[in-house]
Amino acid sequence: MSLPEGLHGLLGMNITATLESLKKQRTILLTTYRKDGTPVGTPVNVVVQGDHAYFRTFDAAVKTKRMARNPEVEIAPSTFRGQVTGTASRGRVRLLTEDESKPIRRLLARKHPFLQGFAVPLFHRMKRFRTLHYELTLDQD
């Protein structure tokens, strides 16, 4: 799989350092892969707990289908609009159960009070989307 333009040669931070930097990071560029291997980047809000990072999306999002087909992803710190600001890392995502999602929902709302605590949940309810939470496990580089 190829990296998005501008990310070549940026892989390599160790997992602990990457997770520590993500604790302060509000947004990451989550890169998922189409059936043909083409990378597609999407900015998502992120929280870290323990050895994993977490993010949310909704069931109708195309990235949800891509992650179900291929859980291999790449992440990089980014701006709200997806402009990469740091080192990229590879990992795997896992869809959380409803019970596993509860503490992550609270963490996201605490770190991003307006967006993840109010606006995103309201939008998902209004559109009748099912909110999905994912666990991200980073690969050893």
Image (tube, rainbow, N blue to C red):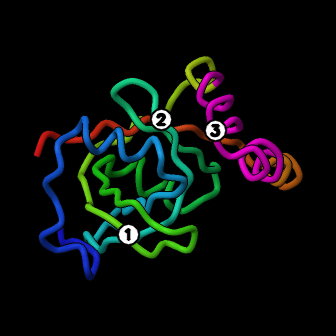
Residue 120 appears at what percent x and percent y?
76, 51
CA separation, marks 2 and 3? 16 Å
Which mark lies nearer to you, 1 or 2?
1
CA separation, marks 3 and 1? 21 Å
The secondary structure that dominates the magenta segment is helix
Q: Is residue 58 above or below residue 15?
A: below
Label placed on residue 63? none
**Cβ atoms under marks 2 and 3 closer than 8 Å:** no
Q: Residue at x 37, y 41 (%)?
A: 93
Does the magenta-highlighted stretch encompass residue 112? yes
Q: Amino acid at mark 3?
A: Leu
Q: Secondary structure at mark 3?
A: helix
Q: Secondary structure at mark 2?
A: strand
Q: Residue at x 35, y 39 (%)?
A: 20
Does the magenta-highlighted stretch encompass residue 120? yes
Which mark lies nearer to you, 3 or 1?
1
Q: Residue at x 38, y 39 (%)?
A: 136
Which residue in the structure is indicated by mark 1?
85
Q: Residue at x 26, y 61 (%)?
A: 87
Which label's residue is closer to the chain start, 3 or 1? 1
Q: Image quarter for residue 100?
A: top right
Q: Is residue 40 above or below residue 57?
A: below
Observer-nearest of 55 and 68: 55
Where, quadrant-wise, is the N terminus in this rendering? bottom left
Which residue in the structure is indicated by mark 3?
108
Label placed on residue 95? 2
* 33 horizontally vs 79: left or right: left
Q: Amino acid at mark 2?
A: Leu
Name the residue at the bottom extreme: 5
Question: Which range of residues does the magenta coloring cover?
Answer: 102-121
